[in-house]
Amino acid sequence: MPLLTALVIVITAFFTAFLSGMFGMAGGLVLMGVLTAFLPLGQAMVTHGILQITANGWRAYLLRQHIQWRIVGLFSLGTVAAVGLLFLIPVHPNKASVYLTLGFLPLIVWVPRQWVHLDAGRPAHAVLCGFVSAGFSVAAGISSTVMDIFFVRSAMTRHEIVATKAIGQIIGHGVKVVYWSWAIIQAMGSGALPPLWLFLLALPLSFGGTWGGKQVLGKMTDTGFVYIVRILITLIGIFYMVRGINLMLA
């Protein structure tokens, strides 16, 4: 891996962890776009998954008293069902489809509540959240935006949303890492996996970014939190939509 590429990834890991530390999302969305631009798709998926597992694990630890474990358990049931389906029906996206999906998903948060009222606090909805999130994690590299549809409309506080989503994202990214690592090894051998030294450089910065984002989260209000999340991911989504269309037309 070229040194310049590694440097871009390491710096991006810090700033995106900071974003996720504040909002429980957005960071992973940005990181996936950067990795896809600089790495082959399979390597981008594995790298993104490992970095996000680490960042979300640290965020979950910092906010551990706010985790809603009942929701996590139900979410896990949905993930197990998705894993079985994914190995029965393999997913092979290209970069254009990944960017288009990254661009489309953020727009869902603007769907009026009365049209689709999904709430992670409801058992059936939590299971569905796990199923859908695992699928999008493997196919597009991200699951946080899908999870927002279920979490932003719940009765949870901003700290409970960020903490519980962190556990859910660890599960989803874990599925993605296993799935894409297996695909890379089958196609090109273990030597094609991202190098270990890249993670040794990026992970400490990811920890630092997550800690910094948590400090800002504590200064926000619940209402301001939801509003900023919607605006931020919409702007990111528009950028990725344009990028995906350009790749399709190239």
Image: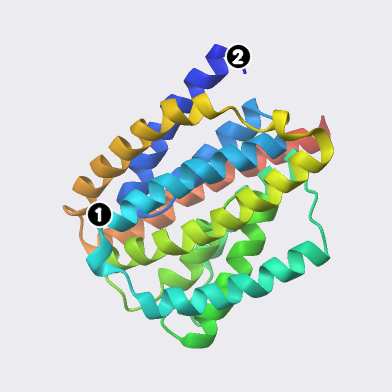
Label 2 sits on a secondary structure element that is loop
Local packing at callout 2 (Cα closer than 10 Å; few below 14, some 14-19, many 20+) is: few
**Which amino acid lies under the numbered mark 2 shown in the image of this protein?**
Pro
In the rendered image, residue 248, in percent from the top left (x then y), is placed at: 80, 38
In the rendered image, residue 82, in percent from the top left (x then y), is placed at: 67, 70
Q: Is residue 216 above or below residue 126?
A: above
Mark 1, residue position: 62
**Residue 45 found in image quarter:** top right
Q: Earlier in the sequence, mark 2 or mark 1?
A: 2
**Which amino acid lies under the numbered mark 1 shown in the image of this protein?**
Leu
- How many labels were placed on the picture? 2
Query: Of residues 71 and 191, which is closer to you in this image?
Result: 191
Residue lying farthest to the front in this orientation: 190
Q: Residue at x 55, y 41 (%)?
A: 48
Mark 2, residue position: 2
Residue lying farthest to the left in this orientation: 219
Q: Is residue 118 visible?
A: no
Q: Residue at x 33, y 49 (%)?
A: 58
Label 1 sits on a secondary structure element that is helix
Query: Of residues 203 and 212, which is closer to you in this image?
Result: 203
In the rendered image, residue 243, in percent from the top left (x then y), is placed at: 66, 36
The quadrant in which the N terminus is found is top right
Q: Residue at x 75, y 69 (%)?
A: 85
In the rendered image, residue 146, in percent from the top left (x then y), is placed at: 55, 63
Q: Residue at x 68, y 66 (%)?
A: 83
Local packing at callout 1 (Cα closer than 10 Å; few below 14, some 14-19, many 20+) is: some
